[in-house]
Amino acid sequence: MKEIIEDCIIFSCRHCEEGEARRSNPKKEIASRTSFARNDESSILGINRFMVVITMIIFTFILCACQNQPLYKDTQVMMGTFVEVISPDKQAAAIVFNEIKRIEKLLSKYDLQSEISQLNKLGKLKVSPETFFILTKSILFYKQTNGAFDVTVGPLLDVWGFTDKKYILPDKSKIKQAMQFVGSDKIVLNEVDSVVKFNSPGVEIDLGAIAKGFAADCAVEKLKGAGVKSCLINAGGQIYCLGERFGKPWKVAIKNPRGQGNAGYLDLVNKAVATSGDYESYFEVAGKRYMHIFDPRTGFPAESGAICVTVIAPDGLTADALATAIMVIGKEKSDAIVKQYPEVIVKIIDKNE
Ligand code: ADP
Ligand code: MG
């Protein structure tokens, strides 16, 4: 079902609690939500640090000046989140949804038939080029971040209750036990036959930190193949802006999450933007927050001081993975990794700011 939108403001929130899609006159606001869960004034992203306490929600903001040029918008639940597609091209949404569905069927650990589920179960599997590619990239990020980005964190999410949402502060012994299975050095990739295997039992791959960005990239390739020149994909806050919107950049706003209004705006053309934060999924015990992004080296939820990381990159996979990785690494130590990606722009909000 497509929707024609004229003269509109659109924003998408990352939390399902944020509210249903709505319209409000006279601005015709349309909001979509996700089920995920989930400087100074001259900063590169143009975010005034005094305006931003914590950036909790990234949302798209589209102000359509051209009354007679319609945009089509469609939203579907996929990859455990809301995927939103906005384009002047009617065929864009169907192309994006088909492709993201295909990728989800390969990569979701919640789909028992997926390649990742089969691999987790069997410990060895010949996989598709897409799965092989994302695992190769994941291991590269693991190495570049000295283990901060690690797609084998699944057992930690289990033991801390993030998988079944029965949050718990586990005993040290339980954490130690789970840690035996953590470490992307336990994944062996054979390029010759595309076989992936684990060199120790109990390893579980979870691509939650990278799959949405990758899925958006795959969808962009399909759009380009079909001749679509302008489209915004918002996969649960992982956004890709293809081309321009009526001759101007797509405007993506970063919303001030724990206050009112917007923290800043980004003008994006052929770029991805992703955000990770300590507010996506967390629980609190005695006033201390435990979030869903783990430091795989300690077995505890990351405590780098970063509370929100926004990354602009040429592709969604890089933006998604780096945003998660930098949440673990923290502001002080992030330079070394950011330097390896000259085309990437990073904005980190630290709890001490
Ligand atoms: P979102 O919840 O919006 O997808 P992220 O992209 O930051 O946010 O991904 C968080 C997810 O990534 C977690 O729910 C978990 O599945 C996985 N994860 C947690 N810690 C790490 C880590 N250190 N490295 C890689 N993946 C992680
Ligand atoms: Mg991520």
Image: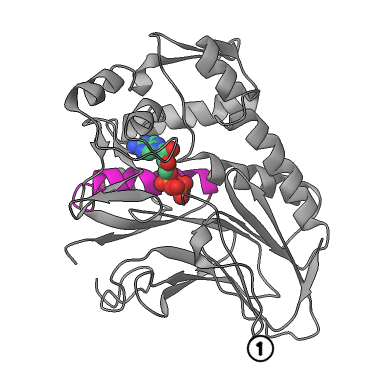
Q: Is residue 4 above or below residue 315?
A: below
Q: Quadrant of the N terminus?
A: bottom right
- Return the residue nearer the eye: 336 or 22: 22
Q: Amino acid at mark 1?
A: Asn
In the rendered image, which residue does mark 1 sit on?
A: 25
Q: Is residue 322 above or below residue 4?
A: above
Magenta stretch, main secondary structure, is helix
Helix, strand or loop under label 1: loop
Percent across and percent down for residue 172 are: 18, 27
What's drawn in magenta, residue-wise?
315-335
How packed mark 1 is, by other alpha carbons closer than 10 Å (few <14, some 14-19, many 20 or more), is few
Q: Residue at x 52, y 64 (%)?
A: 13
Percent across and percent down for residue 224 are: 74, 50
Q: Quadrant of the C terminus?
A: bottom left
Q: Residue at x 34, y 71 (%)?
A: 258
Instruction: Report if residue 341 is visible in the image.
Output: no
Percent across and percent down for residue 235 are: 58, 52
